[in-house]
Image (cartoon, grey):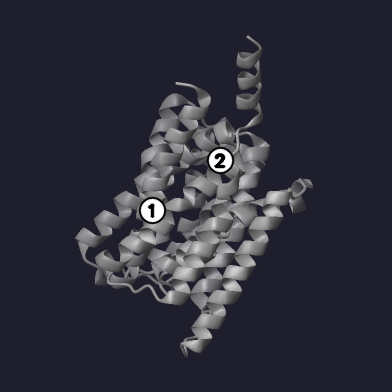
Amino acid sequence: MSPRKQGYFFVLVTMCIWGGFTLFARLNAQWHISAWDIAALRFAIAFLILMPILIYKKDLAFLWSKHAVILALIGGVIYCLTVYTAFLYAPAAHAAIFLNGCIPICTAIAAYILFRQPFDKHTWVSLAIMITALALMSVLMLQGNASAFGIGDLLLFISAIWWGIFTVLLKQWKLSAWHSMASVAIWSAIIYLPIYALFLPKHFMEVSPVHLAIQGIFHGVFVVIIATLTYVAAIQRLGAFKTGSIVTLAPFIAAILAVPLLGESLSPSIVVGLVGMGIGALQPWRWFRQDSLAQKIQQQNKQD
């Protein structure tokens, strides 16, 4: 299997888990699991699985890199707390718009600010489409006597900023998929769990053990370990932008599934936002153009 096909396979796996992440994170609100608790559960389970493996393999040296700690803080602790809190206030459709719809643009902005990677014309077009979609969505919301934006939407957008920075740093620092995932999981647990144990409120006793088990396995194993491995592997093979834009599809699908599964609604204003942000994030006009490698192969075949 070629590196490109491998990249698309890893993207597909990541899409399935990220789509599920949106739905499961929304279930936290219905099951009354707080952001503090689900973050602790996520980091603790991942730590208990990964640490024995690292000790057995005698593969601990990479953990002492400052890059490992920075990635854990941004893509682990801070991102998780903001995004899990956001899902307590915002429905799945809003997450598709303000979180996943904004990740590609936040990634491009982070790449420019941190490493002076310039915007290309496609990024400018995407930005114009997204701003137009958000403006139209806001007008429709106000006409329907609904509040345009809430605290959940703001937290989702802040989460997109964190994830954009995390994505760019992953690409720039060129850590392996295994070391990237383990760094985030281990250091997130080391940093967050003592703070949680000493200072933060806990509501485990008020939640069904079955619900805790389901959320713990999904977030601690599938999201932290499997999806991080496949996401980093996809970035290494396809690049940060292409990976981020394809994976963006998953939460849009989840937003539609949330209507029958979670009883959430899709108003005309939200549909406008979903379509506009989806087009801006995916940049579909780029997907129908041949890349330079394909053009060279085609020219060689014609010459032969």
Q: Position of residue 153 (x, y in %)?
A: 52, 72
Residue 19: give its label.
1
Residue 31: give its label.
none
Q: Amino acid at mark 1?
A: Gly
Q: Residue at x 41, y 27 (%)?
A: 56
Q: Position of residue 266 (x, y in %)?
A: 38, 72
Q: Residue at x 68, y 53 (%)?
A: 123
Binning the other alpha carbons within 10 Å of mark 1 as few (below 14), some (14 to 19) or many (20 upward) gives many
Q: Earlier in the sequence, mark 1 or mark 2?
A: 1
**Can you see residue 216?**
yes
Position above or below: 102 against 16: below
Label 1 to label 2: alpha-carbon separation: 25 Å
Q: Position of residue 224 (x, y in %)?
A: 42, 46
Number of marks present in the image shown = 2
Position above or below: 165 against 288: below
Q: Position of residue 104 (x, y in %)?
A: 60, 53
**Can you see residue 83?**
no
Left or right position of 119 against 126? right
Position above or below: 267 against 47: below
Residue under label 2: 288
Q: Amino acid at mark 2?
A: Phe
Q: Residue furthest top?
A: 304
Q: Are marks 1 and 2 in contact (CB under 8 Å)?
A: no
Given residues 240 and 143, the one toward you in this image is 143
Left or right position of 110 against 25? right
State which quadrant residue 87 falls in. bottom left
Q: Residue at x 49, y 74 (%)?
A: 152
Binning the other alpha carbons within 10 Å of mark 2 as few (below 14), some (14 to 19) or many (20 upward) gives few
Q: Indicate the secondary structure of the residue bearing disc 1.
A: helix
Q: Looking at the figure, which quarter contains the C terminus?
A: top right
Q: Residue furthest bottom?
A: 145
